[in-house]
Amino acid sequence: MYSSKPTIVYGFHGLDKDIAISILNQKSEFKHSNNKYDWLGNGVYFWENNLERAHQYALQDSQRAASNVKDPFVLGAVIELGNCLDLLDQKYNDFLKEAYQQLKDDLEAEGTPLPENRSFGKTDFDFKARELDCAVIRYACALAKEQGEPFDSVRAAFIEGDPLYDGAKFFF
């Protein structure tokens, strides 16, 4: 299986200020996201090396009707990725492609359709339900665990927003 040397990154997490203070005072912990549409599977999401984007995220989240973010805030963290499913590295993209095919084959054998990535429309600030991506990540993590090398983290580039300029493939 694949292994990766430990890598340290700086991560930023947008959340409510009262929750952040509680985490800093060790009265609570980061809340793990466990939705079936979470892009990179279960866990806590951080913006790598991007304090400003984490702040923008917290501001956007605070504007949602059901948001718990009343006073947008950002916590920074030094993160050791450990054995990382690093989708910035081709060997892990290849592994994820294999995991997708195995998941597809398994679900077909069961007569179960593959989940789909779909749009929420304009009801949420991210506009996407990444149920397929989440299912593939979860499956890949399960495969790695079965092989005795569970992943400690998942890392990927997140392309979002509008093109920076006409015809651009860079986004903001």
Image: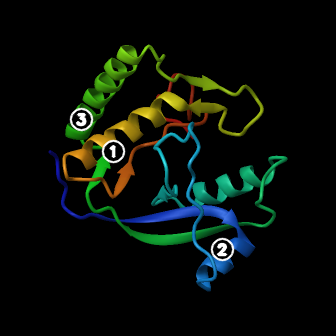
Q: Quadrant of residue 106?
A: top left
Residue 95 in percent (x, y) is at 24, 35
Residue 154 in percent (x, y) is at 37, 50
Q: Around disc 1, counting alpha carbons within 10 Å, would you say few (fewer than 14), some (14 to 19), or many (20 or more)?
A: many
SS of the residue at dot 2?
A: helix
- Residue drawn at x 60%, y 23% is 118
- Residue drawn at x 36%, y 20% is 104
Instruction: Give the residue number, with chain letter if any, for mark 3.
Output: 95
User: Looking at the picture, does residue 146 appear above or below residue 94?
Assistant: below
Q: Is residue 43 left or right of residue 79?
A: right
Q: Looking at this view, name the residue that lies furthest to the bottom.
A: 25
Instruction: Give the residue number, with chain letter if any, for mark 1.
Output: 141
User: Looking at the picture, does residue 123 appear above or below residue 32?
Assistant: above
Q: Is residue 129 left or right of residue 114?
A: right
Q: CA distance from mark 1 to mark 3?
A: 10 Å
Q: Quadrant of residue 54?
A: bottom right
Q: Is residue 168 left or right of residue 81?
A: right
Disc nearest the viewer among 1 and 3: 1
Disc nearest the viewer among 2 and 3: 3
Q: Quadrant of the C terminus?
A: top right
Q: Around disc 2, counting alpha carbons within 10 Å, would you say few (fewer than 14), some (14 to 19), or many (20 or more)?
A: many
Q: Quadrant of residue 81?
A: bottom left
Residue type beneath disc 1: Cys
Q: Looking at this view, name the residue that lies furthest to the right.
A: 65
- Dot placed on the residue nearer the N-terminal end, 1 or 2: 2
